[in-house]
Image (spheres, rainbow, N blue to C red):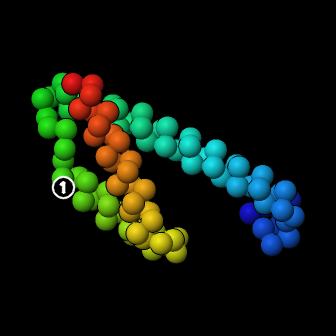
Amino acid sequence: MTQNETRPEEMDLDELREEIEDIDRGIVELIARRTYVADTVAQVKAEKDLPTTDESQEERVMERAGKNAAHFEVDSNLVKAIFRLLIEMNKVEQRESR
């Protein structure tokens, strides 16, 4: 946080809601970036005739999600549920594109 930024506890309700809007925009941007890269992975898998599902990779993603949740003191079950949804959506897209 820079000197010019207001700390959350010093913000009014409208400012807090604006902050949430900015965060939400950032989350959507990150989902879009992740989806783009996952689509590229799908293309590589298709070119190399690899299976859509890679359980060991999914396990690594979920383990990493749990570690990141712990690091940022966020509910691990929530974070893992979000990542499970992202993974499942990517797998559906991969299957449909083949």
Above or below, comparing residue 27 to residue 36 in the picture: below
Choose top left, top right, bottom left or bottom right for residue 15: bottom right
Dot 1 lies on which element?
helix
Choose top left, top right, bottom left or bottom right for residue 51: top left
What residue sits 40% from the left and 69% below the top?
Answer: 77
Q: Is residue 28 left or right of residue 59?
A: right
Above or below, comparing residue 57 to residue 80 in the picture: above
Q: Is residue 41 visible?
A: no
Choose top left, top right, bottom left or bottom right for residue 47: top left
User: Which amino acid, mark 1?
Assistant: Ser
Q: Is residue 65 left or right of residue 25?
A: left
**Which residue is disc 1 drawn over?**
56
Screen quadrant of the C terminus: top left
Residue 24 drawn at (x, y percent): 63, 49
What residue sits 44% from the left and 63% below the top?
Answer: 79
Residue 72 drawn at (x, y percent): 52, 70
Frontmost residue, 64 versus 94: 94
